[in-house]
Image (cartoon, rainbow, N blue to C red):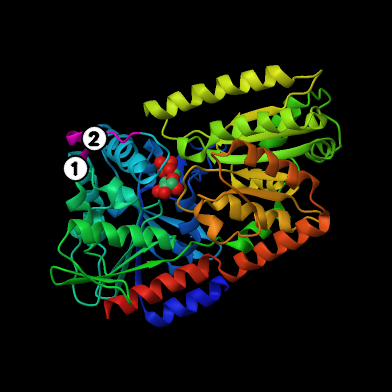
Amino acid sequence: MKPEELKSFLDKKKLHFILAADAEPRIHQKRNEDGSENIFIPAGGVSVALDPIAQVANAVFIGRGRTKEDKEVVSRGNKVEIKGDLGNYYLKRVFVSEKERADYYDGYSNQTLWPLCHIAYERPVFERKWFANYQKVNQYFAKAINEEIKPNSFIWVHDYQLSLVPSMLKKPKGVTIGMFWHIPWPTWEIFRILPQKIEILESLLSCDFLAFHRGYQVRNFLDTVRRELEVRIDEETNRIYYKKRVTTVKNLPMGIDVDVIKGLLEDAPAETVITSIVNTFIGKKDKSSKKNILDEFFKKNNVIVGIDRLDYTKGLTSRLVAIDKFFEKNPQYIGKAVYVGIIAPSREAIPSYQKLKAEIKNLIREINLKYARNNWLPIHLIYHTFSREDVIKFYQKSKICLVTPLDDGMNLVSKEFVIASSKEKEPGMLVLSQFAGSAIDLTDALIVNPYDIDEVADAIKTGLVMSKEEKVRRIRSMAEELENKNIYVWTQEFVKSALEATR
Ligand code: G6P
């Protein structure tokens, strides 16, 4: 489906589209030296995915403002217009105090709910005072939405940071409230320990429609409400009846904007920030060389790539151990294969994230010492948030992409890699954790259990020696699947199902 088709579908429905997510799709930063605006796109998958939808729907997108400049550029109603190729939309920013942000974001969202919902064996932290400010910030979002509501509004709330928003919304007749929960929903035995479980469940049950990526998450949610609340569930339709309200629940794995990735591949500049970084690891002194550094690097090495936020759910330490195992088992690749890990800093104020960063650093030092040869190191890590333009060539040219989370709602990197790689004559291969949401769509990847170090190490080898024909077949079939179920199809299905649920 093309964006125009989604547009005409939405136009026919005459919806006033309101999106709300914690992550804003654009962050304003200090102006460039020439006075032009400096706008930054954050690393998280959710905001990147929602941006084209906001454009097509000419939506009001409510997100949390991050910077001083974010505040400076907004006009009345805290809005700033975002101009896009597919249409314009208003970004309406919610601003919170530093204390509120710390409790709501570093605290309740990312130290309570995030570890509770992801099975990565990171113990959630429970602090009453965090919840108070989490409620408060959810109130701010709800207020910002309520100010925008018209009789034909379609309100689409996103993710765990805003779980209380649905219960705080006005709901005049004709308005639809939909919510997408982008992270896993755990089993009841795990969710039941949350002190504020009833507030959150009751809020989610004030939506008309609630969706998750995977079927097992829907089943976990149904089981949770069944055990915690006096609900009636229609097993045939997944409708939940509770206190005179009806909520329909469904699994809808999110797609990507395939055309945008293809466009980026065509337009990607030969020289990017990454090129100069690669320059430093291949120790090239002659910067004036006309030769394309990246091409040279990819030609010389079997490049294995990983692109992640620095997060314990992403399985980064196990991945490094698996790379060590790969070299141990396959010494013929010493000096011939390199792992380039591109890691976007994330949630840096949180102790578990700081601890992980230190662990990774130590592990890399150990592995690099073990295998280093003159001018060659097996692992290069780059801590930086890159734009997709910057990393797209890396996806395209890499022999292997390692996506090995311990638990992940969806994982868009795996999908973007498949599209980028499908544009190469000899594509690469994806090694994918069975615990990434995307494993439901990308069944032709080399699917692994990230806890099984030998299995991951062997999959790297399998991918490297796989015949060109086999790689072409697998990557093409996955790319086709992604074309058929792109972000526009996903949006249309969400809107259709939510409208049906409201009737
Ligand atoms: C995950 C969450 C998103 C979040 C993103 C980035 O994908 O589901 O809601 O925005 O991570 O995390 P951050 O904390 O940087 O917004």
Q: Is residue 243 left or right of residue 240?
A: left
Is residue 129 shown in magenta?
yes
Q: How many residues crowd around disc 1 within 10 Å: few (fewer than 14), some, or many (20 or more)?
A: few
Residue tagged by mark 1?
195
User: Is 115 placed left or right of 329 in the picture?
Assistant: left
- The picture quadrant for ligand 1 comes to top left
Q: Is residue 275 visible?
A: yes
Mark 2 secondary-structure assignment: loop
Residue identifier under label 2: 126
SS for callout 1: loop
Of residues 248 and 97, the one drawn nearer to the viewer in this rendering: 248
Q: Is residue 9 magenta?
A: no
Tell which residue pokes out farthest to the right in this image: 290
Query: What's the amino acid at mark 1?
Result: Pro
The reply to whether discs 2 and 1 touch (Cβ–Cβ < 8 Å) is yes
| Disc 2 to disc 1, C-alpha distance | 8 Å
Q: Which segment did they paint magenta?
A: 123-131
At which x and y percent is residue 356?
47, 27
